[in-house]
């Protein structure tokens, strides 16, 4: 058997070839096994890595989805830590409060709200809300730029795994809701005012109807007395000293028949004149309170003005005189007569109030002019009253805006008139006013088909 001598650093030793071969084979096997194990491990690691990558991808996808949802949510959302500092906010929150990244840094959520007692109380309570519970409140919030808006907020508590309690604040700008609510409240008030007016109208027209009958028979009787008296006068004229007894003559002298015969016809004439006036007022009240149906009719605006001037006489006669300058042959306007009466009434009452407010010792003047211009009917109502400042003119059409004392002004007259002329009749309502000098309102209503077509095309 051959022997190979090997010399190693450790010294020389001699191994048989067989044992060397065996050792080599063993080591080869061991290396192959190790390589196999390593490959197996690497494969498993690779698979685990792939699985992790997938999980990470899914998580990233979910995170992006969540962010997309958060950023497309219209409500502003703030995640707030236990020290009331904003930890995260969505895009709507940043937009609503005009927040930049710098602005968000170390931002205390309380700085976003106007301090009020209610909010302070509610905020105190938020420290005690339980997980899942929600507290809601409304108030005024302030943007970083300083402007304010009404908001509604819901706060919910979030229990973290580490035991800390954070809160989620969901805030909505409710400006539009508040505006709609105010609009609805105005409409309700307007409606109730309109219903009251209608009830008054029905009452007034009922009273006018009742007064009509006695007016007629009082008038008939007065005319009968007038005729009868003229007959009696011709009889009395025949009582002269030549034809009558002394007794009759002294009775006539005692009754002062001469005076009666001269004065009674004038008294009857005055009564008839007064009665005519009453009849005219009663007719105006009837026309004013029940001017046909509520829809659009063709209306003689000159007649509507005369009627309204008559029924409002008591409102202006102590402070002003009214001059009418009504264009003859004015075209009939397609209007709702009741509505137009109301607008003219508002204008006349406002003019009389402005004249009273000015407080001149002499009577003021209200001048009403009508004329037609290119198919439009213009009604100008001017007064010599106190006039309006620019500030009042800017706000005069606002519902419930009034400069008058409580109980005198409701601030609805011009708002309703504006609505009637602009919205219902597609017309215009213009105003020029000079403080201390007076005011002129011009109502413009399209009357001919051309003017209306023009108006519709331009509105
Ligand atoms: N002809 C006018 N002259 C001066 N001020 C006027 C005149 N018409 C309206 N105003 C002003 O506009 C305000 C609003 O008018 P209006 O809506 O009719 O309400 P109200 O008469 O109840 O106050 C009045 O309070 C008044 O200040
Ligand atoms: Mg008024």
Image (cartoon, helix red, strand yellow):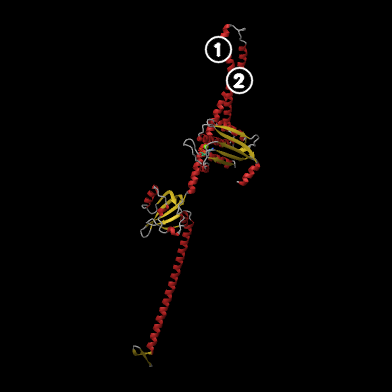
Residue 231, placed above or below residue 36: above
In this figure, which residue is indicated by the disc labeled 2?
Answer: 223
In the image, residue 244 lies at what x, y percent?
60, 7
Residue located 49% across and 46% down the image: 179
In the image, residue 153 lies at what x, y percent?
43, 51
Q: Out of 234 and 122, give the one closest to the viewer.
A: 234
The Cα atoms of the two marked residues, 2 and 1, are separated by: 23 Å
Residue 140, placed above or below residue 310: below
Task: Tell how many labels.
Answer: 2
In the image, residue 12 lies at what x, y percent?
34, 90
Quarter occupied by the N terminus = bottom left
Tell us which disc is closer to us: 2 or 1: 1
Quarter location, residue 289: top right
Residue 29, placed above or below residue 128: below
Disc 2 under 8 Å from ligand 2? The reply is no
Residue 450 in sight from this viewpoint: yes
In this figure, which residue is indicated by the disc labeled 1?
Answer: 255
In the image, residue 277 lies at what x, y percent?
58, 26
Q: How would you rate the neighbour count of disc 1 (Cα within 10 Å): few for under 14, some for 14-19, many for 20 or more? A: few
Secondary structure of the residue carrying tag 1 is helix
Q: How would you rate the neighbour count of disc 2 (Cα within 10 Å): few for under 14, some for 14-19, many for 20 or more? A: some
Which badge, 2 or 1, comes first in the chain's sequence?
2
Residue 296 in sight from this viewpoint: no
Secondary structure of the residue carrying tag 2 is helix
Residue at the far bottom: name it: 2
């Amino acid at each position: 058997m051959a022997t190979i001598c090997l010399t190693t650093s450790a010294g020389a030793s001699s191994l048989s070839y067989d044992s060397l071969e065996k050792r080599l084979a063993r080591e080869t096997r061991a290396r192959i096994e190790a390589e196999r194990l390593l490959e197996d491990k690497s494969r498993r690691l690779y698979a685990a890595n792939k699985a992790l990558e997938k999980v990470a991808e899914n998580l990233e996808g979910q995170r992006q989805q969540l962010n997309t949802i958060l950023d497309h949510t219209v409500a502003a959302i703030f995640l707030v830590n236990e020290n009331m500092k904003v930890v995260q906010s969505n895009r709507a929150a940043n937009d609503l409060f005009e927040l930049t990244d710098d602005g968000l840094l170390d931002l205390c959520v309380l700085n976003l709200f106007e301090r009020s007692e209610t909010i302070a109380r509610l905020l105190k309570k938020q420290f005690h809300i339980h997980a899942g519970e929600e507290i809601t409140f409304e108030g005024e919030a302030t943007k970083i730029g300083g402007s304010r808006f009404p908001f509604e907020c819901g706060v919910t508590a979030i229990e973290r795994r580490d035991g800390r309690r954070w809160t989620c604040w969901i805030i909505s700008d409710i400006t539009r809701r508040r505006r709609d609510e105010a609009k609805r409240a105005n409409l309700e008030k307007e409606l109730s005012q309109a219903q009251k007016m209608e009830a008054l109208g029905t009452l007034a027209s009922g009273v006018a109807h009742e007064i009509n009958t006695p007016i007629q028979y009082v008038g008939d009787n007065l005319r009968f007395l007038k005729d009868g008296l003229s007959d009696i006068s011709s009889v009395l004229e025949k009582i002269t000293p030549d034809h009558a007894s002394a007794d009759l003559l002294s009775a006539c002298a005692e009754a002062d028949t001469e005076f009666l015969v001269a004065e009674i016809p004038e008294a009857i004439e005055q009564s008839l004149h007064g009665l005519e006036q009453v009849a005219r007022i009663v007719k105006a009240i009837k026309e004013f309170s029940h001017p046909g149906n509520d829809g659009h009719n063709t209306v003689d605006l000159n007649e509507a003005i005369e009627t309204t001037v008559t029924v409002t006489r008591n409102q202006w006669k102590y402070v002003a005189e009214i001059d009418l300058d009504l264009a003859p042959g004015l075209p009939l306007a397609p209007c709702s007569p009741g509505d137009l009466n109301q607008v003219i009434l508002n204008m006349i009452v406002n003019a009389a109030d402005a004249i009273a407010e000015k407080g001149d010792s002499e009577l003021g003047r209200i001048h009403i002019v009508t004329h037609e211009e290119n198919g439009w009917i213009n009604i100008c109502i001017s007064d010599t009253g106190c006039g309006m400042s620019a500030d009042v003119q800017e706000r005069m059409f606002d519902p419930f805006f009034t400069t008058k004392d409580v109980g005198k002004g409701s601030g609805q007259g011009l708002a309703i008139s504006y609505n009637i002329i602009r919205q219902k009749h597609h017309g215009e309502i213009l105003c020029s006013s000079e403080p201390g000098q007076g005011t002129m309102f011009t109502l413009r209503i399209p009357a001919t088909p051309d003017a209306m077509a023009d108006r519709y095309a331009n509105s």
